[in-house]
Structure formats: structure tokens, C-alpha cells
């Protein structure tokens, strides 16, 4: 009897370790290059910005996010705005990020700013330097610097909406990327997590009232699942976001007036990035 019980325990352990290896360890070992971010591939996002509603696990709306892109002759910049409500008793919180890609599709720089936290400056700045990607994190008077491995920082996202744009996916593809957690910055701590994203298959979902087939992307250790159209546009994400719990980020019709109102609602002061792009017309192309 004890021998059979011991054998069952061993078999269960072997099965569990095998599943863990294939789910979490093997993708990290076999991680490839991230999706290519060339200027031409961003054309759809430049012409048709995206807006997403953010819901909690009970279906209550927590906020809205917007994603848009602009390009010059030397680089493409992807901008993201996230407006969250009910996190602080003082009002709304706005998170602004921008990611600069060079002509080869590599990240040149990443910036994240959090607005709406009283009397506090919260900012993350990173810029590629050879084999390293040094990031400066400022939380009020406290500033610290961390050096990220550039090979694991060729894509950077935030914990509320990890993916902004993922073109030319294929099933089985995997890559490493960095995640910045704005919620930890609000709580005066700093957290950046290295994750592995894997394209696990294809699935049909409802997209703005019509069925579409999407690539499905899963991440580890951050529990995220994303549905991506063939052109790279991320239409839905389900995220285990620190400080927010399980949330769903679902695309909805883009309304430029909502973005304009969001950026006016939470004062940003005199931020350089906002001065740089304030004259850009983010409305969808006719």
C-alpha cells in the first residue's frame, strides 16, 4: 500500500515538473527575437489610433487607454495614454508612455510618466546604450538607476496594458520583454519585471460586433493573455495587474475628444513630451 502511494506521489511530481518545464522554462530557453517594429508596419496604427476600455473582474469600468503612433524619417514613436479612476482619493491618475523605435525596429528610448499623485514626480526614462538599456526611475526626490539587458529590453510595456502593437506574429514564436508597473511607482516602490511572451495559437473572438481570427499571446510569469489581429493591432488583453487585480482591456471605437479631455483632466505641468506632440493630429485618417 505504502509502495503504491509512494509511486503515485513520484508520478504526480514528474507530471507536474514536466508541465512546469514545458509551460514556463522551455519558452524562456527558446525565446527568439521580438516582433519586428519597422516604420511601414506602423502605418495602420498611425492612420487608425486605438482606444480601449479597462474593466475589473466584475465588469466595472476602471478607465480608458489610447494608443497612437507617429513617424519621422529616422524613427517611429508609439504613444500610450492610460486614465484610471478610483485608485486614489484625490482623483484620477494618468499614465503617459512613449517608445521610440529606430529604422531597424529597435527601441532607442522609453519614457513613462504618472500624473495625478499629489506633490510627487513619478517618471521612468530609459535609453539604449550598446549592450545595456539604463533606466532612471524618479519618485519624488528619490532617484535610482538600473541597467537592463538590451537583448531582453527590445520590447517594453506597462503592467496595465503590456502590449501596444505586435505585427507579423506566428504560432510558437516567443520573446523576452520588460514590464514597468505604474502601480508600484504610485506606492513609492519601483518594479520592472522581465517576462517571456509566447504565441500559443489562434482563436476567433468578437471584435467590435464582428467575428475575427486573432493570434493568442500568453506571458509568464506575469499572467497576461492577449488577442492580436494579423496586422499587429492588439484588440483585447486580460491582465493580472498589481494593485488592480484581474482586468480586461477591450478595444472600443476611437474618440479623439475622450483623449483630449483625459489629458486636460489630470494636469501634466510642462512636460517636454507633451510639448513635442501637442500639435500632432491624432484623429484617424478619413
Image (cartoon, rainbow, N blue to C red):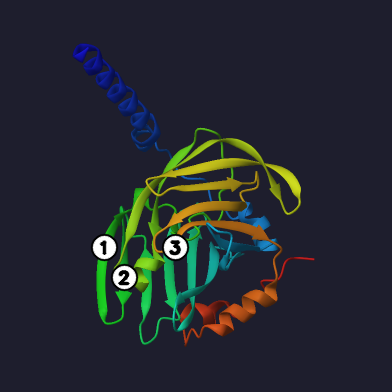
**Position of 91 relative to 200 (above/below):** below
Query: Is residue 280 something one can see in this rendering?
Result: no
Q: Residue furthest front?
A: 1
Does label 1 or label 2 sit earlier along the sequence? 2
Find residue 86 and report its horizontal and vertical position in percent: 49, 75
- Label 2's element? strand
Left or right: residue 226 compared with residue 284 = left
Q: Residues within 10 Å of mark 3 (few under 14, many from 20)?
A: some
Tell me, yes or no, whether the two marked residues, 2 and 3, touch with CB atoms within 8 Å: no
* In front of the other: 100 or 175: 175
Residue pictured at 63% horizontal, 75% vertical: 259
Query: Is residue 97 something one can see in this rendering?
Result: yes
Tell me, yes or no, whether the two marked residues, 1 and 2, touch with CB atoms within 8 Å: yes
Q: Which mark is residue 244?
A: 3
Residue pictured at 25% horizontal, 77% vertical: 142
Tell me, yes or no, whether the two marked residues, 1 and 3, touch with CB atoms within 8 Å: no
Q: Which mark is residue 137?
A: 2
Find residue 213 and report its horizontal and vertical position in percent: 68, 40
Name the residue tied to disc 1: 146
Disc 1 or disc 3, which is closer to the eye? 3
Does label 1 or label 3 sit earlier along the sequence? 1
Amino acid at each position: 500500500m505504502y509502495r503504491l502511494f509512494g509511486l503515485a506521489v513520484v508520478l504526480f511530481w514528474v507530471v507536474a515538473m514536466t508541465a512546469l518545464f514545458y509551460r514556463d522554462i522551455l519558452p524562456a530557453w527558446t525565446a527568439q527575437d521580438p516582433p519586428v517594429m519597422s516604420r511601414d508596419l506602423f502605418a495602420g496604427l498611425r492612420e487608425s489610433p486605438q482606444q480601449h476600455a479597462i474593466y475589473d473582474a466584475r465588469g466595472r469600468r476602471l478607465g480608458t487607454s489610447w494608443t497612437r503612433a507617429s513617424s519621422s524619417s529616422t524613427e517611429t514613436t508609439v504613444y500610450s495614454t492610460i486614465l484610471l479612476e478610483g485608485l486614489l482619493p484625490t482623483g484620477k491618475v494618468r499614465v503617459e508612455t512613449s517608445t521610440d523605435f529606430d529604422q531597424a525596429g529597435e527601441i532607442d528610448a522609453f519614457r513613462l510618466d504618472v500624473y495625478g499623485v499629489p506633490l510627487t514626480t513619478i517618471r521612468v526614462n530609459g535609453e539604449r546604450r550598446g549592450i545595456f538599456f539604463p533606466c532612471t526611475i524618479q519618485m519624488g526626490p528619490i532617484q535610482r538607476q538600473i541597467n537592463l539587458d538590451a537583448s531582453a529590453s527590445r520590447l517594453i510595456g506597462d503592467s496595465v496594458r503590456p502590449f501596444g502593437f505586435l505585427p507579423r506574429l506566428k504560432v510558437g514564436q516567443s520573446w523576452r520583454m520588460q514590464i514597468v508597473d505604474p502601480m508600484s511607482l504610485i506606492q513609492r516602490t519601483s518594479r520592472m519585471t522581465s517576462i517571456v511572451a509566447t504565441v500559443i495559437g489562434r482563436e476567433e473572438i468578437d471584435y467590435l460586433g464582428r467575428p475575427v481570427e486573432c493570434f493568442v499571446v500568453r506571458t509568464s510569469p506575469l499572467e497576461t493573455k492577449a488577442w492580436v489581429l494579423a496586422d499587429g493591432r492588439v484588440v483585447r488583453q486580460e491582465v493580472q495587474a498589481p494593485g488592480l487585480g484581474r482586468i480586461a482591456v477591450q478595444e472600443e471605437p476611437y474618440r479623439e475628444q475622450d483623449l483630449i479631455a483625459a489629458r486636460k483632466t489630470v494636469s501634466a505641468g510642462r512636460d517636454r513630451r507633451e510639448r513635442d506632440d501637442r500639435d500632432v493630429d491624432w484623429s484617424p485618417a478619413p
